[in-house]
Amino acid sequence: MSGRGRLALCAYLATVLAACSMLPLVDPASWILQAAFLLAIVAGVGALARRVPLARPLTVLAQSVVALLLLTLVFARHQALGGVLPGPDAVEQLNSLLQQGTSDVGQYAIPAPATAGIRLMMVGGVLIIGLAVDALAVTFRSAAPAGLPLLALYSVAAGLSSGGASWLWFVLAAAGYLLLLLAEGRDRLSQWGRVFGGAARAPGRAQQGVFDNAAPLAPVRTGRRIGVLALGIALVIPAMLPALNGGLLGGAGGGGGGDGSGGTISAVNPLVSLQNSLNQPEDREVLRYNTNAEDTKEMYLRIVALDEFDGASWKSSERHIKDVPDPLPRPDGLSPVVATTEVQTSVSAAGWYAQSWLPMPFPATQVKIKGDWRFEPVGRTLVGDRKQTTRGAQYTVGSLLIRPTAAQLANAAPAPADLLKEYTRVPDSLPSVVSATARQVTGGAVNNYEKAVKLQDWFSTNGGFTYNTHVQSGSGTEAIANFLQEKEGFCVHFSFSMAAMARTLGIPARVAVGFTPGTPRPDGTMSVGLRDAHAWPELYFQGVGWTRFEPTPTRGTAPDYTRRQTPAGNPSNPAEPSKRASAEPSAAPSVSDSCPPAARRLGDCGPSAAAGVAAPTDGGPSASALAGAALGAAVLLTLPLLPLLWRTRIRARRLGSGGRTPADAVARTLAAWQEITDTAWDYGIPPDDSRTPRKAAARIVRLGGLDGAAAESVHRAASAVEQVLYAPVPQPTPGLVDDVTRVTTGLRTQATHRQTLRAILAPRSAVRVIWTVTLRWDRAKRGVAGWVRAAGARGRAGGARG
């Protein structure tokens, strides 16, 4: 194997080893095999392009195009043209998968399931990093900077896992990079021989090596700079990236800390994925439970309570957590005179469902579960400690089914002052229309209970609101004001708005997040899916505690104590179930019984009711998708032509007419000679600046196989260069443009078809663009450094005079 072949193989292995650091992020890890196979194809294309040989930029472009075609074939072949060409539909599909993957990253905990979106992000990311490493280390023969994309790949893995990446993955990534450096060093030594440096050997002392000098050589200085930069990236990137542990469905939220007896749970917002959950095309099962409750319509599985509203979003406050007591303390504010029923529920979480809050009926009185779980007493939630999640968890929950009467709620005493202060706080940025609407809707109500029922009925029944999961979500003050005006949204909008309006009326309120009761199965268990994700407001009444309300139309069920037919002064007997409740579970308990048949047929009763309704067909790609596809196609078509366009422009500038001064004559003559040497370079004759113009001309004639007029034109141009460079008075030589044309024609005549195509589409002399940019960059750096030194000198001089 050649030196460059070994280097390409090491670049491939280094990328795969660095990609292994992302294995713990996704389960199953079969995506790494797919990424390694596709990366091998891209690396093979690079090896073939370098063997042709193609110009370096064209080699990278060819690899990029092949990578795009491979991603299209794997992830969007049904929408692609011929199964591989990325047409408008395929571009839209890839964009949709990327958006889905971005959402999935925010909603699942580590290890996240290998959804199509996440797999595209993982495989595509490995291909991009692998292409960058191959281009830097092999195509441009600079292996040291190739460590930066490798480090970026490892840093992303470390950042997404909250810095918890195993040292083994770092060792593998570092080993890959060192292997790449060793391969490059061996390749360089095989071409140039061993490199010696240092001062002259003193008598009696062995020859100094390259590392014995006081001033390091350029490669050593470059290595140090790259090392410093790499260390900076390693420290900064993990701190900037969000951990892959947020979200309602799979996010491992704030965990406890300490020795097991204390700690805190941080403020988090688990609602970022609730809308996506409701809009999932597949209603994946999250939980399955069995309960002895005679009526499952009240079996809401609560995950967390959002009790802090800062104007931007609702979120849970930072709370102290402790060991799980057995039993749990009695719910705050619950009076013994309120009827309650003990309920036992056994829950099994799906193997893919991993998040750090434990879904439970509210209020729980006892929890039996294995693992590291902590108790947050204010919200009465259990949170995983030391990366504990619900993945595959099986647990039993004892809870209370609280049955207050309307009279008990209406006659509730005022809430404690500290609780009232905390849970009626609203931000100053809350638009006045929110409180004004709350007062208008609750006009005529004489107590907080009547106000709460009026708010619930206004949202769910008589306010003209429409349930729609596809509207833009939001939880800030402006989102609430817009929702009250547009009157269209989903559970987030309804619960947030009712809680905020209740607070403006002096009613303590917060928002609960979890799942509606789910769907009964033939075996008597209840199945809870993604589309059962829900948010609802909880309002506080002294003597009853935190009480659920249901303002979202067509979702869940309104509690019995909020219905008008509920007797005002006749509490239900906790020992026997309600006569109106059917002993058999409802066929769709997550859908309101009040949903009219016409709305149910139209699919307006929420995801559960619309399960049998066919989704609307796709009307085709949008105008923006078509425009983006057209722009992408234009870019793909233009990029290969950039060297040709640049070369045409340079040729026109060099051969254009100029002034008539001696200086202009010199410039025109040198430009014509430069064009001849660059044209020869394009046809495979590299320039040799160590030769005189006369010897360079002879070399071009010999290697290019020129004769006749073409050979005479080369020699005439070389003589013109010597005349303008060495004559006392430079004189212009007529006919240089014609000479350049004859030389170009002669070179093209002697070249093969492939050489001619290469000279036109991928001219080697186009590398001068990179040289020019590098030269200007160095000049700019030297200018800035000189200005800094001058400024420092002026400052020191001024200080000395002072």
Image (cartoon, helix red, strand yellow):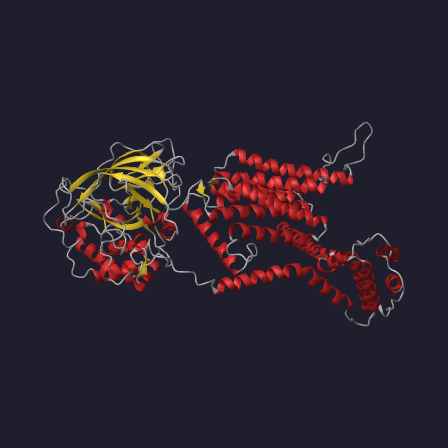
Residue 594: x, y in percent?
Answer: 22, 56
- Please tell me which residue is depicted at 58% across the width and 48% down the height of the picture: 128
Asked whether, in this view, residue 690 is left or right of residue 582, the answer is: right
- Please tell me which residue is depicted at 53% across the width and 56% down the height of the picture: 80
Q: Give above or below for 477 relative to 201.
A: below
Of residues 663 and 169, which is closer to you in this image?
A: 169
- Please tell me which residue is depicted at 21% across the width and 58% down the height of the picture: 457
Count of labels in the image: 0
Asked whether, in this view, residue 699 is left or right of residue 599, the answer is: right
Quarter that holds the N terminus = top right
Q: Note whether residue 132 is visible.
A: no
Residue farthest along the left direction in this orientation: 569
Asked whether, in this view, residue 734 is left or right of residue 18, the answer is: right
Residue 218: x, y in percent?
Answer: 71, 43
Residue farthest along the top direction in this orientation: 204
- Please tell me which residue is depicted at 64% across the width and 59% down the height of the picture: 639
- Image quadrant in which you'd find residue 598: bottom left
Residue 196: x, y in percent?
Answer: 77, 36
Q: Give above or below for 282 relative to 478.
A: above
Q: Give above or below for 144 relative to 694.
A: above
Of residues 52 and 560, which is closer to you in this image?
A: 52
- Image quadrant in which you'd find residue 718: bottom right
Residue 155: x, y in percent?
Answer: 53, 42
Of residues 581 and 172, which is closer to you in this image?
A: 581
Of residues 653 and 713, which is closer to you in this image?
A: 713
Q: Note whether residue 563 is visible.
A: yes
